[in-house]
Image (cartoon, helix red, strand yellow):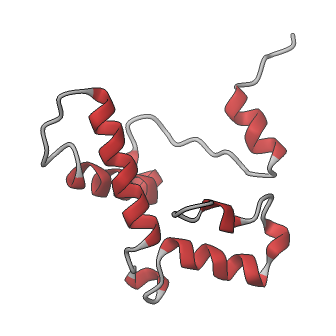
Amino acid sequence: MYKLRHIFDRVCESYDIEHRLTKVNHPWTNGQVERMNRTLKKATVKHYHYESHDQVKEHIYAFLNAYNFAKRLKALKGLTPYEEIIKWWQNEPKRFRINPHQHRLGLNN
């Protein structure tokens, strides 16, 4: 019987990304994602009250932009996540489907 695959799986496949699932009720098997979720919650919903879902989305978007483009991480030897991506882009551009410079903040980007 033909089984329809989830759209996410199809997109992952089109970009040659291996989609791995974790076991239910075992968040420690997905440590990096869980750590980022905790960081995101701590910076937003754990400290602020929001009047609407749109306010939450705006704050999360602002936090992620600050994190990705301004926060220097020890694990990345003082680079921001964006700078690390650009370094990889310069060294191994074939790994990328799109130019990461398109994700820069600012006018005309």
- For the C terminus, the image quarter is bottom right
Residue lying at the far top in this picture: please name it.
1
Q: How many marks?
A: 0
Q: Is residue 92 above or below residue 14?
A: below
Q: Is residue 24 above or below residue 91?
A: above
Give the camera-side residue of 65 and 15: 65
Q: Position of residue 95 (x, y in %)?
A: 80, 67
Q: Position of residue 35 (x, y in %)?
A: 35, 58
Residue at 65% in and 82% down: 87
* In the image: residue 8, left or right of residue 104: right
Give the camera-side residue of 99 and 35: 99
Q: Is residue 2 above or below residue 93?
A: above
- For the N terminus, the image quarter is top right
Residue at 23% in and 48% down: 44
Q: Position of residue 9 (x, y in %)?
A: 72, 35
Residue at 43% in and 60% down: 65
Residue at 57% in and 65% down: 104
Give the camera-side residue of 50 and 16: 50
Residue lying at the far front in this picture: please name it.
107
Q: Is residue 60 above or below residue 74?
A: above
* In the image: residue 23, left or right of residue 7: left
* In the image: residue 59, left or right of residue 83: left
